[in-house]
Image: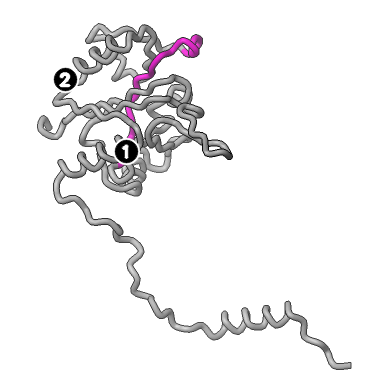
Amino acid sequence: MEHQTTSKEKILKKVRQALIFKQKAKFANIDLESNLYAQPPQEELVMETFAKNLIDLKGQFVFCNNRFDCIDKLIILIEQRKWKHLFCWEEDLQNLLKDSGITFTDRTGNIEKVQASVTSCESLIARTGSVLVSSKKNTRAMTIFPPVQIVIAYSSQMVMELKDGMQALKNRYGKNLPSMISFISGPSRTSDIEKTLVIGAHGPKELFVFLIDDAKHE
């Protein structure tokens, strides 16, 4: 009795033939590495791109000429909001706040009382207006629980693309990459099946980025 070739066998035969008789790729010279977007020619334009995209995401951008200017503007914000319970975990930022007379806590025991957290970051991604954070610099809890997150960053940390931020991480940590890497793009927001937007459902309701211009002082 003659064997009937099944549909499955026909498909497998075609796959085997395709593997044996490979055709030359028609588009072998396609460049998959170069950026799709035109690159801003100046550092100032990269900063403007970040600020615009951050603001479009409902984040708040504060430019600071130097560390002293940053502290002055931070104190004004704290006084305006009448914050009494700030959290800061990172030693460098703690020293900056101590020298300025800003009170804070580094204990997570009373996390429900924290009104705002002060953190640093790994990089700022201009293309998306995002803040790249990791567990090496930031506690996981303090990028999620406080209603307000204040990121203090430097212009030298700003890169244009996501891949540039990831490359900076690899250059900094080598094979010992942080266990947690996250991109913060504006305040936390989500929506339900009825498309009702909720701000702060899975993280801070407000995001401030205080950018210190350190390029002129290097």
What amino acid type is highlighted by mark number 2? Answer: Asp
Work out whether residue 96 can be spotted.
no
Front-lying residue, 91 or 165: 165
What range of the chain is rendered magenta?
A: 108-125
Q: How is the image coloured?
A: one colour
Q: Residue at x 43, y 25 (%)?
A: 204
Between 216 and 82, the one lying in front of the other is 82
Residue 158 placement (x, y as % from top left) = 25, 39
Which of the two marks, 1 or 2, is nearer to us in this view?
Answer: 1
Q: Quadrant of the N terminus?
A: bottom right
Determine which of the numbered discs, if any, sits on residue 30 in the image.
Answer: none
Image vertical order of residue 164 relative to residue 15, above or below = above
Q: CA distance from mark 1 to mark 2?
A: 25 Å
Give the farthest residue toward the right.
1
Element under disc 2: helix
Q: Are marks 1 and 2 in contact (CB under 8 Å)?
A: no
Left or right of 16 on screen, residue 82: left
Q: Secondary structure at mark 1?
A: helix
Tag 2 residue? 69
Residue 14 higher or lower than 92, as above or below? below
User: Which percent across, then down, holds residue 123?
Assistant: 31, 37
Asked where in the image residue 138 lies, by quadrant, the reply is top left
Percent position (x, y) of residue 17? 60, 84
Badge 2 local density, few (<14 within 10 Å), some, or many (20+)?
some
For disc 1, the marked residue is 56
